[in-house]
Image (cartoon, grey):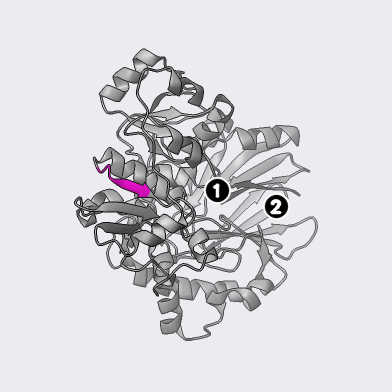
């Protein structure tokens, strides 16, 4: 058996290529959209990708199953569980509970494990030349290392009211299937720490059934479904806005992107014209560089592990945008965008071009701990905390207004235009995004406590809980 775990840190997403070396065939489970990764692995190891499978209709990234099928001719093996509303709208081999997929000498048994979504399935692998017992379980968003998939995304991200309680009950029942598996079976989930598909995902890539039985909080409740449900539905992070779009696109036949796109470098005339037409500009530089000089109305989303998440929160899937990105980071940024279906970039300019394009740059006012501390007693100041709800509840500044950065533009009425605005987050990244959004919305009287709560706590600043 050949096995490779492929982890994409920008989405905290795991996919898998598993092959039968005796027969030279392989399956890919839950592929990302830039599928050249799998083609290269298969070629290097003399394998032909003949099967492509998914554990469920994903919400946090645009699946690459259709692209990979188009390039390889492999068949798609997808869930037919969950009812009529949860069926894929393109050709595939439908999978039901207890079905089997054979790839050479490997057998993947299908387990219907709903909860995260109604159609969710897991794949139980038996490597028949070695043993007749199962050895691996590919759980998708069912069981993670130390956590389980959240059942509230259909309601909170896709607007399907009343589904989270149903999902919690299904998850409770699905865990009974998990509990019956041998302790030695390896657990390989679709996500790790950093994913918004759960609230406490572990950082190690895999686990075992036995280890999860003694470690995973979700397996501690016995028959107490009420307590389990209350814990499962509490404290989940805000689902990114783009999740609803991914749910839609991952069900349907859509335009394919079978290679990483190449974006045009714009000249000054083109940039100025687009800027005058209010085309969104995403500046991917680090927050310190951005603060020192940025194109008015541009939005700072730093090119780090969270880039895809915030791009999905901020960008409109129906509108074009321009990138400010260094040439040596262009391919990385392009891949991060295509993985969540943001394909409408007009082009890019480099950071070096900012001084020569003929647009006067603005600056961001960054303040230190002392000035922020003084602002707490200023009646003409408004403190804006743009962290998420759980962070705010864990401890916040006195008199702070809380608006999560992802929903800031829908809550501009909470900003008092007559007061000096002081904003912060945990360590400055989200505050810079927030400042960009407010500036673009016409709110200019802003001071950014960029060090944020991380420094505030280190300096023993006053907190309210």
- Name which residue lies at 29% across and 68% down: 162
Nearest the eye: 141 or 285 = 285
- Name which residue lies at 25% across and 62% down: 379
The picture quadrant where one finds residue 252 is top left
Q: Which residues are magenta?
A: 443-447
Kindly report the distance in space between the C-alpha atoms of the residues bearing marks 1 and 2: 18 Å
User: What residue is disc 1 on?
Assistant: 30
Nearest the eye: 372 or 407 = 372
Relative vertical location of residue 359 with respect to residue 454 in this rendering, above or below: above
Q: Position of residue 338 (x, y in %)?
A: 47, 35
Crowding near the residue tagged with mark 2, few <14, some 14–19, many ≥20 C-alpha atoms within 10 Å:
many
Residue 446 included in the magenta stretch of the image: yes
User: What residue is disc 2 on?
Assistant: 106
- Name which residue lies at 26% across and 23% down: 276
- Which quadrant is home to the C terminus? bottom left
Q: Secondary structure at mark 1?
A: loop
Residue 16 included in the magenta stretch of the image: no
Crowding near the residue tagged with mark 1, few <14, some 14–19, many ≥20 C-alpha atoms within 10 Å:
many
Residue, far bottom: 223
Q: Position of residue 194 (x, y in %)?
A: 54, 56
The picture quadrant where one finds residue 127 is bottom right
Residue 350: tell me if it is visible: yes
From the viewer's perspective, tell me whether residue 357 is left or right of residue 318.
Answer: right
The picture quadrant where one finds residue 181 is bottom right
């Amino acid at each position: 058996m050949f096995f490779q775990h492929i982890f994409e840190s920008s989405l905290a997403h795991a996919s898998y290529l598993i092959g039968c070396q005796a027969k030279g065939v392989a399956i890919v489970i839950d592929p990302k959209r830039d599928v050249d990764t799998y083609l290269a692995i298969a070629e290097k190891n003399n394998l032909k990708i003949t099967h492509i499978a998914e554990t469920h209709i994903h919400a946090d990234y645009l699946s690459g199953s259709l692209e990979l099928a188009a390039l390889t001719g492999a068949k798609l093996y997808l869930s037919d569980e969950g009812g009529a509303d949860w069926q894929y709208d393109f050709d595939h081999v439908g999978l039901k509970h207890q079905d089997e997929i054979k790839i050479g000498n490997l057998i993947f048994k299908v387990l219907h494990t709903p909860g995260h979504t109604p159609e969710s399935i897991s794949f139980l692998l038996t490597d028949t030349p070695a043993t007749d017992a199962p050895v691996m379980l590919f759980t998708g968003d069912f069981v993670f290392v130390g956590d389980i998939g959240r059942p509230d995304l259909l309601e909170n991200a896709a607007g399907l009211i009343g589904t989270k309680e149903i999902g919690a009950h299904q998850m409770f029942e699905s865990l009974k299937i998990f509990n019956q598996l041998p302790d030695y079976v390896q657990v390989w989930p679709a996500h790790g720490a950093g994913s918004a598909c759960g609230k406490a995902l572990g950082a190690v890539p895999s686990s075992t059934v036995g280890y999860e039985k003694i470690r995973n909080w979700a397996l501690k409740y016995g028959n107490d479904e009420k307590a389990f449900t209350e814990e499962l539905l509490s404290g989940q992070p805000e689902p990114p806005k783009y999740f609803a779009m991914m749910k839609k696109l991952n069900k349907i036949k859509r335009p394919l992107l079978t290679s990483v796109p190449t974006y045009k470098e714009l000249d000054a005339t083109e940039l100025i014209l687009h800027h005058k037409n209010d085309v969104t500009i995403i500046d991917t530089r680090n927050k310190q560089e951005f603060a020192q000089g940025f194109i008015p109305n541009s939005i700072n989303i730093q090119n780090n592990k969270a880039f895809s998440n915030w791009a999905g929160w901020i960008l409109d899937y129906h509108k074009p945008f321009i990138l400010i990105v260094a040439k040596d980071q262009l391919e990385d940024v392009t891949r991060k965008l295509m993985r969540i279906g943001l394909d409408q970039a007009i082009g890019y300019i480099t950071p070096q071009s900012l001084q020569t394009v003929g647009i006067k740059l603005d600056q961001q006012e960054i303040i230190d701990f002392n000035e922020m501390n003084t602002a707490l007693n200023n009646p003409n100041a408004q403190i804006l905390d743009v962290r998420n709800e759980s962070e705010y509840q864990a401890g916040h500044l006195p008199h702070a207004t809380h608006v999560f950065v992802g929903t800031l533009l829908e809550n501009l009425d909470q900003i008092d235009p007559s007061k000096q605005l002081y904003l912060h987050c945990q360590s400055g990244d989200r505050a810079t995004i927030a400042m960009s959004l407010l500036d673009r919305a016409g709110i200019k009287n802003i001071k950014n406590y960029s060090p944020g709560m991380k420094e505030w706590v280190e300096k023993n600043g006053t907190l309210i809980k």
